[in-house]
Image (cartoon, rainbow, N blue to C red):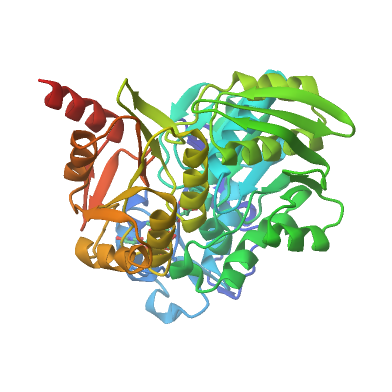
Amino acid sequence: MQNREGEGFLKIKDLIKKIDILETNVKDFDKDIADIAYNSKNAKEGCAFVCIKGFKADGHEYIDEAIQNGACLVVVDEFYDTSKIEGKIDYIKTSNTRKALAVMSANFFGHPSKDFLLIGVTGTNGKTSTTFMIKSILEAYGQKVGLIGTIKNMIGSSEIEAQHTTPESYDLQKLFWQMKSEGVDSVVMEVSSHSLELFRVYDCDFDVGVFTNLTQDHLDFHGTMENYFAAKLKLFGMSKKRVVNADDSWGKRIIEMYPDCVTYAKDSDACVFARNIKLFVNKNQFELWYNGQKKEILLNIPGLFSIYNSLAAAACCIALGVELDTIKRGLEDLKAVPGRFEIVESNEKFTIVIDYAHTPDGLLNLMKTVDEVANGRKVLLFGCGGDRDRTKRPIMGEIAGKMADFVIVTSDNPRTEDPLKIIADILEGIQKTKVEYVVIPDRFEAIKYAIKNARENDFIVLAGKGHETYQILKDRTIPFDERRIVKDIIKELRE
Ligand SMILES: CC(=O)N[C@H]1[C@@H](OP(=O)(O)OP(=O)(O)OC[C@H]2O[C@@H](n3ccc(=O)[nH]c3=O)[C@H](O)[C@@H]2O)O[C@H](CO)[C@@H](O)[C@@H]1O[C@H](C)C(=O)N[C@@H](C)C(=O)N[C@H](CCC(=O)O)C(=O)O
């Protein structure tokens, strides 16, 4: 990957434009800065090191390491006692170093997002699929499109690995800069609530902000739904145009605040809506309505939620002036979204689908779709993540118990938690229902059990992992690709 080095250095005075300076010992603001680092390990000759007090570590404790690695300027937070570094290095004290990192990064890379259309999609569920759909429509419109999100980042059809749903501000601005250098017309990105809260997208100008929905998730981080909503809301204060799901109760609150938004809904009380919806195992059919005009859409992405995501994508592109014929073409061109209602096996006996659903609402919508398309038993295999919102576990257990005919409770990235403790939380909910279930903590063995014991016409759903190809156990990340695992198990059982 290229970086800005090729374009030269930036003077301190230009790098720190628009950040508030509480204290500084810098004498020469014309000094050149080679790069920015927010991790001391990545600091290099002539760079600025921005210290962040995080959830696990405090960047201020790594100033010496950054200096050893060549940093010539440090940016510290207002609580920091600068007498510790006086005489050692140039410093700037500012009121919020996460904000400063975002502003400095945008300055360093020359505000690349001003040179293309920037679309941000936020909401608990549907962000990934909606961004894929918007990309496909804008490509049908003739644009070169960048995509930033959970599964991967893309420039046109080339792929770049993604670490976060929304990258840290420096990495985001660097990616924007690369996308600009490669001539994109627009960038569509997922905007997570974490990124809004932690200023990763601060100082970005969004042309359109899209809201899909808000349901319980990430309460380990936000504490309450109101805080979670407040984080999401920030995107709409940063966007020129807003596209909002009018069927969502939190969406209705955004519409009250911004009455000029482009709204979408399943029924007709919105600018863009769908009628005559037909769900099939591997596709959907519906009428897309806008301004008295109708288009028949045959969507290759199954699931009821895909209708909502298509409406969000269509409304976004309508807000950008794309005509309905192109929207139809773009939606129909999209062949799949990895890990979203992805059929990984379909034989004369059973069907296996993998899906990323990992929230109560996501699981409910997934199982509603399965209910529409399954001919036999609905077998649901799932677990819940460790070190994340615990309150959703019994809720998901109860949904599983109500919606499935048979449940296999297993593990899904237990991280540092005891998998059996997580499963016990899920069982609290399952035991409120009468569903038949088994507990198999080892996810590989659980999948094997589902396949080995499959009955005629079973519709087996492996929920939670979707596109993920790993399992996080304690501090180890081990390879775990359910597409391959399913194939291997079927082969092994046949031999
Ligand atoms: C809660 C959260 O989002 N934390 C993120 C945050 O961590 P942090 O700021 O607390 O960092 P920290 O590890 O405490 O370190 C503090 C500072 O010391 C620095 N440091 C640390 C060690 C060292 O040797 N030298 C050094 O300079 C670090 O670089 C950092 O600047 O900033 C880090 C750097 O960008 C992120 O890696 C980290 O993401 C963690 C790993 C994470 O799991 N985040 C998830 C929850 C997340 O953001 N998820 C959303 C998607 C949610 C969804 O919709 O599903 C996302 O956008 O990906």
Residue 131 lies, with reference to residue 431, above or below; the image says above
Q: Would you identify the image quadrant in which residue 264 lies? A: top right
Residue at image location 35% in from the left, 50% down from the top: 42
> Residue drawn at (75%, 59%), measured in percent from left and top?
252
Q: Residue furthest right?
A: 292
Is 182 left, or right, of 379 in this rendering? right
Residue at position x 26%, y 58% in the image: 415
Above or below, 162 relative to 1? below
Across and down, in percent, residue 127 comes to: 57, 44
Q: Residue 322 versus residue 7: which sits nearer the camera?
A: 322
Looking at the image, which is closer to me, 79 or 120? 120
x%, y% of residue 339?
42, 35
> The C terminus lies in which quarter of the figure?
top left
Q: How many marks?
A: 0
Which residue is depicted at the point 86% across and 56% down?
A: 259
Where's ligand 1: which quadrant?
bottom left
Quadrant holding the N terminus: top left
486 is higher (above) or lower (below) than 211:
above
Q: Position of residue 209 (x, y in %)?
A: 70, 48
Q: Nearer the viewer, residue 191 or 205?
A: 191
Q: Is residue 320 left or right of residue 20?
A: right
Q: Is residue 454 left or right of residue 22?
A: left
Residue 197 appears in view: yes
Which sits in the foreground, 162 or 96? 162
Residue 152 locus on image (x, y percent)? 45, 35
Question: Is residue 88 visible from the viewing direction of this image?
Answer: no
